[in-house]
Image (cartoon, helix red, strand yellow):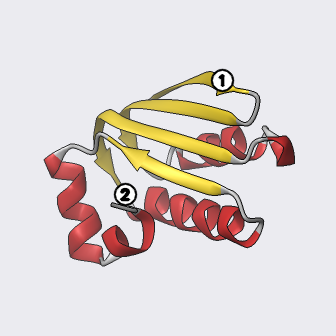
């Protein structure tokens, strides 16, 4: 999996994920999300090229969403593929993690 980031403005970072977010690389995403600190108030995750997500990947996202919400910051997921959306919907994570 590759994770590229772009700083959109002073307080927003976008991460583009490509490949598979699974047990092997979920800790990498977790580290990258935490590295920005409190000066970032919005994180956008672009799932356009994310092909697969495992339960470990979902756990990392859920924890990040909870942390961001507690700190009055936002985590937004965009451009989710249908195959990944199905996993989110089947597990009940769609309503918890995706704001429409």
Question: Could you tell me residue 4's position as x and y percent?
Answer: 54, 22
Q: Quadrant of the N terminus?
A: top left
Residue at 40% over, 62% down: 99
Between the residue at mark 1 and the residue at mark 2, the CA separation in whole angstroms equals 27 Å
Depicted 27 relative to depicted 96: above or below:
above
Residue at 59% over, 24% down: 5
Nearer mark to the viewer, of 1 and 2:
1
Residue under circle 1? 7
Question: Could you tell me residue 34's position as x and y percent?
Answer: 75, 47
In the current view of this chain or complex, which residue is farthest to the bottom?
92
**Left or right, 73 with reference to 24:** right
Secondary element type, mark 1: strand
**Left or right, 47 with reference to 36:** left
| Mark 2 surroundings: few (<14), some (14-19) or many (≥20) residues within 10 A | some
Residue at 68% over, 38% down: 32
What number is the disc on residue 64? none
Q: Earlier in the sequence, mark 1 or mark 2?
A: 1
Question: Could you tell me residue 82's position as x and y percent?
Answer: 14, 49
Depicted 62 relative to depicted 83: above or below:
below
Say whether marks 1 and 2 touch (CB < 8 Å): no
| Mark 1 surroundings: few (<14), some (14-19) or many (≥20) residues within 10 A | few
**Left or right, 83 with reference to 64:** left
Question: Could you tell me residue 70's position as x and y percent?
Answer: 73, 72
- Using the image as rendered, state which of residue 5 and residue 58 is in the foreground: 5
Residue under circle 2? 54
Depicted 51 relative to depicted 88: above or below:
above
In the current view of this chain or complex, which residue is farthest to the right?
38
Secondary element type, mark 2: loop
Depicted 90 relative to depicted 73: above or below:
below
**Left or right, 39 with reference to 49:** right
Q: Quadrant of the C terminus?
A: bottom left
């Amino acid at each position: 999996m590759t994770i590229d980031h772009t700083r959109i403005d002073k307080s927003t970072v976008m991460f583009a994920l490509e490949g598979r977010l699974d047990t092997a690389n979920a800790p990498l995403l977790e580290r990258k999300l935490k590295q920005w600190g409190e000066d970032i108030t919005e994180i956008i995750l672009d799932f356009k090229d994310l092909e697969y997500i495992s339960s470990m990947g979902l756990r990392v996202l859920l924890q990040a969403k909870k942390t961001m919400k507690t700190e009055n910051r936002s985590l937004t997921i965009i451009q989710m593929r249908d195959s990944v959306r199905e996993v989110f919907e089947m597990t009940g994570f769609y309503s918890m993690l995706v704001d429409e």
